[in-house]
Amino acid sequence: MPPTTFYALTMLAAGIGIPLLAALNSALGQYLSSPVAATTILFSVALTAALTVLFLTSPAAIAGAVSAPKHLFLAGLLVAFYVLSITFVAPKFGVGNAVFFVLLGQLISAAAIDHFGLFGARISPLSLTRATGIAIMALGVFVTQRV
């Protein structure tokens, strides 16, 4: 399998997981009457899974965290914000609607990151063709939520 196919399939699976995560954690939050408790449990399970993979694949890599630029750790706050917000909002707004706005935000953010090569990302300028493609994708997601 070519690497690009593997990468595409991996990210497709991750994309499929986002609405599942939203629905499952929202249901847990409702069951517990606490979106924060559900989120804490989710992160405990996620930490256990990540630590298991880390220790099985590259345990020495954790030592590099001490010298890593501190602003890179903001990613943890962003994922916590995402999980807390989707767990709280999805039961009230609908999983589809919540994920629609997440996708719209991802399209905008990804285009900016790629255009400017932020955080070491490969530069991919926002051409008119690319902007049109992103707009069509956003429109497609919008249309699927209007039904």
Image (spheres, rainbow, N blue to C red):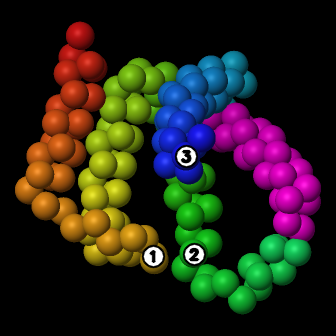
Label of residue 119 in the image: 1
Q: Mark 1 or mark 3, which has the lower sequence index?
A: 3
Relative to residue 126, is residue 87 drawn left or right? Answer: right
Give the residue at mark 2: 72
Residue count near mark 3 (Cα–Cα under 10 Å), binned few <14, some 14–19, many ≥20: few
Q: Which residue is mark 3?
A: 2
**Residue drawn at point x = 60 percent, y = 85 percent:** 69
Which of the marked residues, 2 or 3, is nearer the chain's N terminus? 3
Element carrying mark 1: helix
User: Marks 1 and 2: in contact by CB < 8 Å?
Assistant: yes
Foreground mark, 2 or 1? 1
Q: Which residues are magenta?
A: 35-59
Whether pointer 1 and pointer 3 mark residues with C-beta atoms closer than 8 Å, the reply is no
CA distance separating discs 2 and 3: 30 Å
**Where 1 sits versus 74, above or below?**
above
Q: Amino acid at mark 2?
A: Leu
Task: Give the image location of residue 26, x and y in percent.
Answer: 58, 26
Q: Quadrant of residue 113?
A: bottom left
Q: Would residue 51 be found to the left or right of residue 145 on screen?
A: right
